[in-house]
Amino acid sequence: MEEKDKENNGSSGGTTRRQFLGQVGLAGAGLQLAPLLAKATGILPDNEALPIEPITVNIMINGSQKTLTIDTRVTLLDALREKLMMTGTKKGCDHGQCGACTVLVDGRRINSCLHLAAMCEGSEVTTIEGLAKGDDLHPMQAAFLKHDGFQCGYCTPGQICSAVGLVKEGRAKTDAEIRELMSGNICRCGAYQNILAAIKEVQNA
Amino acid sequence: MNESLGKPIDRVDGRLKVTGGATYAAEYKIKNLAYGAPVLSTITKGRVKNIDIQQAEKMPGVIGVMTSENCMMLHTPSGSDPGSGKFAEKDLLPLQNDRVLYGGQYIAVVVAETAEQAEQAAATIKVTYDEQKPVVGFEANFSTAYQPGSGLGGAKTQEKRGDADAAMQSAAFTTDETYTTPVYSHNAMEPHATIAEWNGDKLTVYDATQSVMGVQGLLSNILGIPKENTQVYALYIGGGFGSKGFTWANTLLAPMAAKQFNRPVKIELKRQQVFSAAGRRTQTQQKIGLGAGVDGKLTSIKHDTISETSFVDEFVETAGVATSMIYSSPNVEVKHSLVRLNRGTPCPMRAPGESVGMYALEVAMDEMANKLKMDPVQFRITNHSDMDEQKKKQFSSKYLKECYQRGAEAIGWSNRSAEPGMTKQGNLLVGYGVATATYPANRSASSAKATLFADGHAEILCGTQDIGTGTYTVMTQVAADAFGLPVDQVKVKLGDSSYPKGAQSGGSQVSASVGPPIRAAALGAVSKVVKMAIADEKSPLYGKKEEDIVVNSGRIQFKDHSNTSESFTDVLRRKGLDKVEAQAKTNVSTRQQQDAAPAPDGSPEAKIEAESKTNAAVQADEKTDRKDYVFHSFGAQFAKVLVDPDLGTIRVEKIASVMDIGTVMNLKTATNQIMGGILFGMGMALMEETKYDPNNGRIVTRDLAQYLVPVHADIPEIDVQFIEKPDPFISPIGARGIGEIGVTGMAAAIANAIYNATGKRVRDLPITPDKLIA
Amino acid sequence: MEPFRFVKAQDNLAAIRAAGINQAKFIAGGTNMLDLMKLNIETPKQVVDINKLSLYKIEELQNGGIRIGALVKNSDLSYNPYIIKNFPVLSEALLSGASPQLRNMATTGGNLMQRTRCPYFYNTDFACNKRVPGSGCAAITGYNRMNAILGTSDKCIATHPSDMCVAMAALGAIIHVQGPKGSRAIPFADFHLLPGQTPHIEHNLKQDELITHVEIPALPFAVKSYYLKVRDRASYEFALASAAVALDIQNGTINGARVALGGVGTKPWRSLEAERALIGAPANAQTYRTAANAALAEAKPHKDNAFKIELAKRTLVRALTTVEGMS
């Protein structure tokens, strides 16, 4: 799909970005009378009658600035998969119950399925696609490959991003601690023992 | 020459999988793609009176709503072509009428520009029903149980030898207990998904399936389009475990909607929808009666299973299928019966039959060993079957006794106290358990195409797929050895229905089925090159006999004279050829009832069959006399558990699993497969359970917070070992399948270990803390 | 999911103002809010992102207590050295909940607002008085293994799912909220409401009130405190039963006790009955069992969850025994 189509997919109505900003601006003007909001820099349209419009967000993804105009309902996960066609991040349950969608936001591992893209303004997101440096795999990717830390591969991007987050957090010292702190990533194929070996290798390197 | 086979090489698709580059069904970039959101029934039984789609149709982004009122008519799939795949619910093609036969059945599909819009519109659709009283509750409906015909692959559902009842009467020791297993859900990490795109009358489908060929056959059949106009891709599949073996309605609905709205359509199920609309393992009640003499020899085995199926298809969980062959006993009686409930249809789930059947039998064996005051390992060895006493045939190869012995050593069996509840580790009770594992070694007719390119690399095409099992990798190893090339010079391509027909990923059959034709096709291609060389005056091998030529690292050479050689490249370039191709089909089945019929004249299959007549490897393979043998894999599985006696919490501390699966093609992928089976067994034993509402029969636990699968913290130390003795009859490679056997003994080994720890025998899976403190 | 307007608040007052309109909801971590929105259980028309507010501080108070900003992430709170040293029960409760990813998202305020995981609440195809007042309760006659045995009513038996809240209930936390007319403090016990006849009203917070912080008052003996959670799998699961306890034992006698239970109540379940049974009694197994009996005296089981009565008692006894052993 071309870049142009993606943007069209991302907007729900026929409103252009200019119209959208115009409406928000109008609402903002009306709010200036409210003393409580005098300090608010982000203007809050608090009029129930206002139409619900797409939102524009700027997100740094794997070091590259992306600007998306999207339905407010789009999660970070769906923004990646459906709008940016970065399908490395997986959807397993869409409710924070499996960890397949794990990415790093501002350096921390989170479930991208429970995070609105609209909340990512100014965030730095690292996905599985952003870990390798050119042809050189990230050490965690290389270790997963070497230790066969996967079978079907569907939970793998989430496992690897989670493992990168875990090592950075530096709280898991023992096997039991690694296992506990990797429990937010379900591998139905059962490669857990190999995942443990991969993480230990990276930790000990 | 086996340069590569057996080596624990890294997965050839591994790099793509660790970088996010592997593309699963829902992930293809399709121009102008629209999104389909299913509307599922909210009643369990009845008829749809009205579907109000007016509001939905007017909503932003909505392209249309497909219902039984406006959708295309489908053709009932014919069962005659065994390669056509299996539609999971033959009497419930989607949206064809107004009947509702279970909760969560497809009622409509909303198609919109974005997923958010489609889902929102789907939620607004009001369906009114004529609701009828559904048949709910498994045990409550035992009075309606009936005896089904045959099971999967034609398996017999009623078996008998001797007089099991009479033998029970006269046995010195008897046990007669009832074991129950709940509904389990596969929960492959990738939810079922289909993208369909029409180009005129040609259909392209990207599907999460365990059988590209099956989906091609079914779509052609049900949509009424020629096979050659039906292209199916499944390059990467996010796990299946049986749930993607049969084809479910999503695979039909996407092309139906795409046709109706003239847009490519994607249907990606929500996790919640997967529970009701994409298969499950049936609930069972199994009564096992065992009779034994004072010498510990079994004199009678009775295995009576009741399972459930839907009103729209008949799926028999052949839980007793291994019971007639796994132990020696003169008297055996195996029965299966079915009740019909208003639930979605069950389907195979990792080791259909054996998973639940071996659980019940192996716990019963533990109970009998206790009665006999015999060591459970010794009891099993005492009753070892040297042949399949039901079919009266030899096993192709069997090293089960060695499995018991090595497994016992690995787990520390000598530390086990025969008396339950006697061993403590801190405040925790320690228990050890054992169970036998077994699964048939299936092989079916398959074909492949091999191409040697003039630049020195080679390619294999085979219409099977890799659902995570490692097929890409092990077949690269098989092909590399046959081509005489290093693995990095061989590219194996799978998951494409335009390739020669390969096996479906089910029944642990892929390696045994597609390995031989891949090997034969590669050897066939090499043979063509060799024939060119020895007939070519310019070749150093001119005039030599083909049988005196060996292949090594892309070169063909006269045996014993490594200097008398040339490369594939030299031969092909001299001939002005950019490649040489060979196809092979091995028409071998380990299930006699499934022998494939010859392909129709003029079909691509027929061409491959004709070429195979001159392929020496195929001929040798097909000539192997297999009639006198049955093919099974075996293993012994051991568990060590720690139980908190006050809280009832169970911690599996160690698993040891020793498997006799013939040749191990790749130790890394093979070990991983067995660990996967172990994980399924752990989940089955300790936590997994799909619950239905007792009042209306709809699924209550339908997400991964309520349906528990093992997480990383549950996983013990796992020791997987293999006997590594090739099966001399199954194929020239000697490898039997491995996907399912790992689960078959695991639940029982854990259940037996819990009994050994606590003295409590819980016969109702899963064994959760509440049952242990009761 | 229903469409909504997304607004980002830059300060408390703006957030409160934006939440004042009909069907507005705050979003912080989003781990439960977005989860429920995807299932059409929460259908806000305006979502107010409060992540820019300055509510991220954890401040030690002069008197030994601690003040936790509403936006402090569960992971940051659980690993805070002062919490680990002085209120280990809170750290342990947090770490027993959810997964590292979710704890990196979920906030202190959001955790207080967490809604039940009753499967019937989570499925709009079933009757649920909490979701649709007056529609009935499918759980009472349905599959109710995970449901509550304490604080239930004939309208609702939904379990409160939070672990953090159980620890906070034991510690007697105070919830500070800010509304259009100023701020107020709500004692923890008064924050969550029993279902009674109105299970859809779950807490004492007004539509436009914002949780700003939670105060844990000084409790010197909480240095010996403990959270025990019993569940079917080892991690990433809600409790079958849990207990948060702190004991002040002097010369074998219990001078002070805090007890709260999780996984069994319709709200985080502080048991004053158990505390009364403990205080003044000798620190021994018999006392603990008496306290456990007192805590569960009013328990009312349903078809599938009677086991929780005994399991909760044993969980509490084990937790008390464990704290006794921390000398």
Image (cartoon, coloured by chain):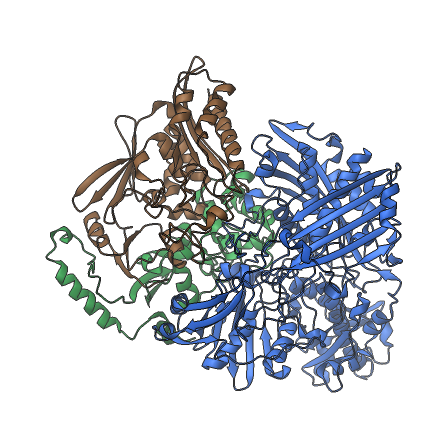
Chain colours: A green, B blue, C brown
Query: x, y (%) of residue B202?
Result: 56, 84
Q: Is residue B494 above or below residue C322?
A: below
Query: x, y (%) of residue B180?
Result: 67, 47
**Which is more toward the observer, B709 or B120?**
B120
- Residue B24's image quarter? bottom right
**Which is more toward the observer, B725 or B504?**
B504
The total number of labels drawn is 0
Left-right relation of A203 to B394: left
Query: x, y (%) of residue A172?
Result: 49, 40
Q: Is residue B735 above or below residue B369?
A: below
Query: x, y (%) of residue B667?
Result: 70, 54
Could you tell me if residue C79 is visible in this image? no
**Which is more toward the observer, C187 or B557?**
C187
- Residue B512's image quarter? bottom right
Left-right relation of B319 to A109: right
Q: Is residue A3 above or below residue B473?
A: below
Which residue corresponds to the image point at 76% horizontal and 76% vertical from the top-left? B584
Q: Is residue A155 above or below residue C145?
A: below
Could you tell me if residue B255 is visible in this image? yes
Which residue corresponds to the image point at 57% horizontal and 43% vertical from the top-left? B714
Left-right relation of C270 to B637: left
Quarter of the figure that contains the N terminus of chain A: bottom left
